[in-house]
Image (cartoon, rainbow, N blue to C red):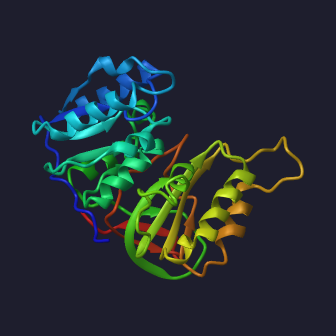
């Protein structure tokens, strides 16, 4: 698969649409604070409050969510799509989804939005794994600035983490949530992992569940294809109440440490902490000896 292209840079005054492809909005205060962050940069943010009415834990029926997303993609006056929150539901949209020809535009989100970001990259367009509207205001200033710089096509500084060794490689960057990505394996929406730097994070998954998912990745043969692995934050994944147990870092080391490829952990992206923006599907460099992940596309 070829590298994904970045959409045209955003400029103050551009119109941005809000999508809820997954879960229903539960915390409006944080959402509107996120909207205000984009407005403070000079953007016009369009919010369809009809999307606040959920269908169970989803932000509307599958048909409603598909139609809203399709409308935002086809509206030529909208230059970017800001996901309101994650949750669950984007993989349901892919069951009857087809990306229609339209001008590339930014798609921004993380967590459950992983499925859409990876599918979008497979169409040759790079979205951004970064804060959704309900988490943006809680980001430190440097992380907010990084996101705004990203969509303006400015160079991004490298992210630093813990070096596991393995040398330095370049490849196509696929960033996402481990649980969501695991459930794409073996489906028509599973991406091509050759020449990929795989960047993963997760939240609230016990060590044995992380073990189970990574074992599936190993058994599927996918990890023999990737060129390097970048690990973000695995928040609330250690369960001190269950004994005996492994810590999540021990599980990551056991399941990934023998692959013979560059690995960097403790990178600042993921849930419940800094979530540094990373474009999906573009050329990147992972240095397992220096502990750095660098985006090469801008």
Q: Quadrant of the N terminus?
A: bottom left
Q: Is residue 214 above or below residue 166?
A: above
**In the rendered image of this protein, does residue 273 appear above or below residue 44?**
below
**Residue beneath the point at 43% across and 20% down:** 54
Q: Nearer the viewer, residue 4 or 69?
A: 69
Residue 131 in the image: state x and y as whole percent.
Answer: 40, 41
Measuring from the top left, give residue 25's x and y in whole percent: 44, 23
Give 101 or 240, whichever is nearer the viewer.
Answer: 101
Instruction: Name the residue located 46 percent from the left edge and 30 percent from the top edge.
Output: 23
> Hey, which quadrant is residue 172 in on the image?
bottom left
Residue 114 placement, left or right of 37? right
Whole-percent x, y for residue 39 in the image: 23, 29
- In this rendering, the answer to whether 30 lies above or below 282 is above
Residue 134, quarter of picture? top left
Residue found at the far front of this picture: 96
Q: Residue sitting at 38 percent across and 74 percent down? A: 171
Q: Is residue 264 above or below residue 24?
A: below
Instruction: Determine if residue 278 is in view.
Output: no
């Amino acid at each position: 698969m070829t590298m994904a292209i970045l959409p045209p840079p955003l400029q103050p005054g551009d119109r941005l649409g809000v999508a809820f492809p997954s879960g229903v909005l539960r915390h409006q205060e944080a959402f509107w604070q996120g909207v205000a962050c984009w407005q403070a940069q000079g953007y016009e943010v369009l919010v369809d409050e009809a999307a606040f009415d959920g269908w169970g834990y989803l932000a509307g029926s599958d048909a409603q969510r598909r139609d809203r997303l399709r409308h935002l993609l086809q509206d030529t006056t909208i230059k970017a799509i800001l996901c309101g929150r994650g949750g669950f539901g984007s993989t349901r949209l892919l069951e009857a989804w087809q990306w229609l020809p339209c001008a590339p535009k930014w798609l921004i989100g993380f967590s459950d939005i992983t499925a859409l970001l990876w599918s979008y990259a497979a169409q040759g367009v790079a979205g951004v794994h970064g804060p959704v509207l309900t988490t943006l205001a809680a980001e430190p200033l440097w992380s907010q600035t990084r996101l705004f710089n990203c969509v303006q096509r400015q160079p991004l500084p490298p992210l630093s983490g813990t070096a596991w060794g393995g040398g330095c490689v370049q490849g196509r960057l696929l960033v996402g949530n481990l649980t969501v990505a695991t459930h794409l394996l073996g489906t028509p929406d599973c991406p091509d992992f050759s020449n990929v730097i795989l960047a993963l994070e997760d939240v609230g998954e016990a060590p044995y569940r992380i073990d189970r998912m990574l074992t599936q990745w190993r058994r599927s043969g996918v990890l023999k294809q990737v060129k390097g692995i970048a690990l973000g934050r695995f928040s609330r994944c250690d369960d001190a109440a269950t004994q005996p147990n492994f810590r999540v870092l021990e599980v990551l080391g056991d399941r990934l440490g023998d692959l013979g490829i560059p690995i960097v952990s403790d990178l600042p992206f993921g849930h419940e902490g800094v979530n540094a923006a990373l474009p999906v599907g573009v050329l990147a460099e992972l240095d397992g000896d220096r502990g750095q992940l660098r985006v090469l596309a801008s």
